[in-house]
């Protein structure tokens, strides 16, 4: 079956930007007025299948599109959301008050031991390669004793507030 | 909710007397992510280099939810200097791959929020890498499809993007860009630049120090602002934004732009800056008269210039091009 996203690339009328690597299209059934989809021309599903430069160009165009949405329709904010389906896409969506959209999540409690194990696992798996050479994974600096913030009640609450995710 | 500044450090009285630069500095000093970067606050760091860090989110949507942030205290994505932006997004695939492998999932969602209304809740720009798997119930990332006709945007967006975006070739990258000569804009051009770039204006108003820092890394910005007294510009813009002076052409537009852009970058304003901002208004009243006069003069000059100099259109486009360029 033909890829839906590849089909979109053929609809030249909806293209608002195109270069060798990416195409930006005005979405036909948008989440809101001001919804653009940035698509790599290569039919690849995962971000890691793309070249570094291609990923950079996708996000550069997404950033430009976000700026353009601020200017053309007076967006109050923008969301950029990637989807790894059959064909990687990046959606740029203009946001306005009372637009009925909400992409935020309910924070989850992760048990401490699971947190530590996923921390170690991710830390060990992030390996940035440059020109074929592997970089050293980072070695984390010694953790500050957690009492340091615990003993300052005021400060701690402030920090927790800063972290608050759900409005 | 972040209105409670750490107590016992700075009194309200002191806040009143602070300049925007000092307030920006204070905001930076109190930024929890800057503290994490400096190692003053513990975190679960998964990657670090000279320009960025990645940490586990302490309020995750799912196990392995990772935040990526520039080390520099940058408030919003469009303000990232090009070198920082390029560095982070060139390496994003390695970060995303590591997050997926570490969390043992096949997919990940990358989520960016620009502006408070979009869910940006930190005055330090960051974005999310969220490990995904079928049945994870993270339906919030499902993008709705609505029967909304947005075809009228085709033209304007096409025009904007063709002005701001340049093709990148995989072989040579950004080096293929021709070297441009950046010239300093006239007062009129500067006004247009600011009018067209509410986010830039917002920064000049609230955080001139950040602009100065950005000038060091960005030749376009440097060329535009090198001979301009940024503090003075900041003061002027603030004064213009707060009053609705009839007869001044700029004021209306600026006012409108202000409301819009304050929403766009509402994180710093609504949160960390909201208190200092309100306080600022008072001392400003004292200087009201001098400022009104200054502004009147400015307004006059501006409108005279606009009338006298129509053929500046082309130049303006070039400049806009450059200015938007610097947001890459």
Image (cartoon, coloured by chain):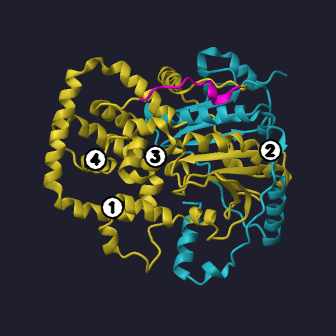
Chain colours: A cyan, B yellow
Residue A1: image quadrant is: top right
Residue in the image at 67% along x and 55% along y: B53
Q: Residues within 10 Å of mark 3 (few under 14, many from 20)?
A: many
Q: Which numbered disc, 3 or 4, marks the residue that appears first in the sequence? A: 4
Residue in the image at 38% along x and 47% along y: B204
Q: Residues within 10 Å of mark 2 (few under 14, many from 20)?
A: many
Residue A45: image quadrant is: top right
Q: Which subunit holds the residue at mark 1?
A: B
Foreground mark, 2 or 4? 4
Q: Please provide percent x and percent y for residue B191.
A: 31, 35
Please determine if labels 2 and 4 lie on a single subunit. Answer: yes
- Is label 2 in a helix, a strand or a loop? strand
Q: Which residue lies most toward the bottom here?
A: A151
Residue in the image at 13% along x and 47% along y: B293
Q: Which subunit holds the residue at mark 4?
A: B
Q: Which subunit holds the residue at mark 2?
A: B
Q: Please provide percent x and percent y for residue B275.
A: 37, 65
Q: Which disc, if any, is residue B264?
A: 3
Q: Which numbered disc, 1 or 4, marks the residue that appears first in the sequence? A: 1
Q: Please provide percent x and percent y for residue B22.
A: 38, 63
Please determine if labels 3 and 1 lie on a single subunit. Answer: yes
Q: Please provide percent x and percent y for residue B56.
A: 71, 60
Magenta stretch, residue numbers: B172-182
Disc 4: which residue = B241
Disc 2: which residue = B107
Q: Which subunit holds the residue at mark 3?
A: B
Q: How many marks?
A: 4
Q: CA distance from mark 2 to mark 4?
A: 46 Å
Disc 1: which residue = B19
């Amino acid at each position: 079956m033909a890829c839906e996203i590849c089909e979109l690339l053929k609809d030249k009328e909806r293209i608002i930007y195109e270069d060798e690597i990416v195409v930006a299209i005005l979405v036909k059934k948008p989440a809101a007025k001001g919804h653009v989809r940035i698509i790599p021309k290569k039919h690849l599903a995962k971000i890691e299948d793309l070249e570094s430069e291609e990923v950079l160009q996708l996000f550069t165009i997404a950033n430009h599109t976000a700026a353009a949405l601020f200017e053309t329709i007076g967006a109050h904010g923008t969301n950029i959301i990637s989807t790894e389906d059959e064909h990687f896409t990046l959606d740029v969506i203009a946001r306005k008050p009372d637009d009925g959209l909400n992409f935020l999540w309910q924070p989850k409690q992760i048990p401490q031991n699971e947190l530590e194990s996923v921390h170690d696992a991710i830390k060990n798996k992030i390996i940035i390669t440059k020109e074929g050479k592997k970089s050293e994974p980072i070695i984390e600096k010694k953790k500050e004793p957690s009492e340091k913030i615990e003993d300052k009640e005021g400060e701690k609450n402030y920090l927790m507030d800063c972290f608050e995710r759900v409005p | 909710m972040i209105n409670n500044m750490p107590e016992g450090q700075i009194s309200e009285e002191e806040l009143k007397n602070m300049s925007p630069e000092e307030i920006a500095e204070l905001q930076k000093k109190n930024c929890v992510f800057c503290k994490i970067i400096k190692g003053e606050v513990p975190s679960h760091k998964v990657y670090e280099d000279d320009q960025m860090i990645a940490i586990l989110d302490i309020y995750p949507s799912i196990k392995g939810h990772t935040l990526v942030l520039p080390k520099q205290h940058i408030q919003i994505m469009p303000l990232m200097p090009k070198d920082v932006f390029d560095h982070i997004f060139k390496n994003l695939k390695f970060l995303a791959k590591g997050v997926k492998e570490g969390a043992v999932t096949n997919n990940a969602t990358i989520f960016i929020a620009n502006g408070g209304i979009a869910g940006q809740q930190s005055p330090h720009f960051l974005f999310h890498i969220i490990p995904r798997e079928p049945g994870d119930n993270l339906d919030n990332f499902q993008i709705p499809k609505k029967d909304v006709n947005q075809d009228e945007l085709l033209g304007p967006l096409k025009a904007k993007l063709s002005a701001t975006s340049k093709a990148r070739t995989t072989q040579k990258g950004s080096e293929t860009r021709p070297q441009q000569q950046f010239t300093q804009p006239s007062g009129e051009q500067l006004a247009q630049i600011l009018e067209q770039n509410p986010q830039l204006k917002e920064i000049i108003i609230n955080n001139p120090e950040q602009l100065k820092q950005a000038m060091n890394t960005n030749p376009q910005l440097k060329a535009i602002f090198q001979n301009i007294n940024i503090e003075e510009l900041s003061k002027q813009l603030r004064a213009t934004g707060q009053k609705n002076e009839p007869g001044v052409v700029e004021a209306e537009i600026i006012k409108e732009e202000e409301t819009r852009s304050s929403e766009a970058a509402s994180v710093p304003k609504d949160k960390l800056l909201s208190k200092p901002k309100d306080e600022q208004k008072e001392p400003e009243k004292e200087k009201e008269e001098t400022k009104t006069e200054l502004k009147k003069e400015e307004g006059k000059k501006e409108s005279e210039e606009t009338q006298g100099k129509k053929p500046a259109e082309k130049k303006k486009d070039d400049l806009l091009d450059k200015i938007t360029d610097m947001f890459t």
